[in-house]
């Protein structure tokens, strides 16, 4: 069974994805990692993506979806209990294409897990990190981009009954426990 994990920057999504994948035997799917892997291995898809990225353009959805299909059909992924899509899809067309690919491959989406953390908490967390690029303005801008990009997807998955919104505030262990409980409730 496959899962999608959403959450704003600074919500601890990466940490939670690692924990969930380790506990459930899932393959952690990150679009950036898959793109870089295809480029590094010199695959046909990787060569196409590399040429596009070198021009400074965004890799088109069709190419990303082709990489998704290839990756989830790979022996490494087939050996896992499922896939955790981390921050993917990012657009409605990507979500629709992912649904189609999963259906064609006989895979099932367990749920879309959305970690919800108030903006004030995110700002506080990111400002405490002390990174040079974590200024108040950049953090607010990143949150705005996340909300703008993700809101339509949240509505898309909510309309399909696939969305599970979870409180992302608390200790790492508390949030992991909520995610674990959500995956257990949504398994067949």
Image (cartoon, rainbow, N blue to C red):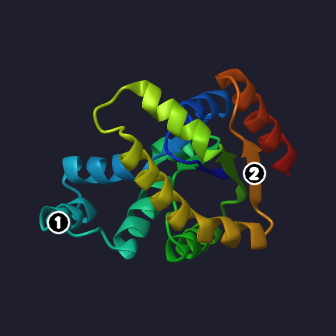
Quick one: SS at disc 2? strand
Q: Which mark is residue 165?
A: 2
Residue lying farthest to the front in this orientation: 136
Nearest the camera: 14 or 36?
14
Q: Is residue 145 left or right of residue 43?
A: right
Looking at the rendering, which quadrant does residue 58 occupy?
A: bottom left
Q: Residues within 10 Å of mark 2 (few under 14, many from 20)?
A: some
Q: Are marks 2 and 1 in contact (CB under 8 Å)?
A: no
Q: Nearer the viewer, residue 15 or 170?
A: 170
Q: Locate residue 64, reporting x and y percent.
A: 38, 66
**Residue 140 visible in the displayed image:** yes
Q: In front: 102, or 105?
A: 102
Q: Secondary structure at mark 1?
A: loop
* Image x and y of residue 149, in percent: 51, 66
Please give the name of the residue rendered at 65% of the width and 52% of the height, measured from the top-left corner.
2
Q: Is residue 58 above or below residue 30?
A: below
Residues 22 and 156: in front is 156
In this figure, which residue is indicated by the disc labeled 1? Answer: 56
Vertical comparison of 28 with 153: above or below: above
Q: Is residue 73 visible?
A: no
Q: Residue 60, position in %: x, y?
A: 33, 73
Mark seen at residue 177: none
Residue 131 position by quadrant: top left
Give the mark nearest the N terminus, 2 or 1. 1
42 with respect to 101 (left or right): left
The x and y percentages for residue 100 are 59, 74
Q: Residue at left 36%, top 26%?
A: 130
Q: CA distance from mark 2 to mark 1?
A: 35 Å
The residue lying at 60 percent from left, 37 percent from top is: 121
């Amino acid at each position: 069974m496959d899962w999608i994990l959403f959450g704003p920057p600074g919500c601890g999504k990466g940490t939670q994805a690692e924990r969930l994948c380790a506990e459930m035997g899932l393959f952690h799917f990150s679009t950036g990692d898959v793109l870089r892997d295809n480029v590094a291995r010199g695959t046909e898809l990787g060569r196409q993506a590399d040429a596009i990225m070198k021009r400074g353009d965004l890799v088109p959805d069709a190419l990303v979806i082709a990489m998704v299909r290839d990756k989830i059909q790979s022996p490494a992924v087939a050996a896992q209990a499922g896939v955790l899509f981390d921050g993917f899809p990012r657009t409605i067309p990507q979500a629709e294409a992912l649904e189609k690919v999963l259906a064609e491959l006989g895979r099932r989406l367990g749920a879309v897990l959305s970690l919800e953390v108030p903006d004030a908490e995110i700002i506080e967390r990111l400002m405490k990190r002390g990174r040079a690029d974590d200024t108040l303005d950049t953090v607010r801008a990143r949150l705005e981009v996340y909300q703008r990009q993700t809101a339509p997807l949240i509505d898309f998955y909510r309309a399909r009954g696939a969305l599970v919104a979870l409180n992302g505030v608390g200790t790492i262990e508390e949030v992991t426990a909520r995610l674990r409980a959500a995956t257990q409730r949504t398994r067949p």
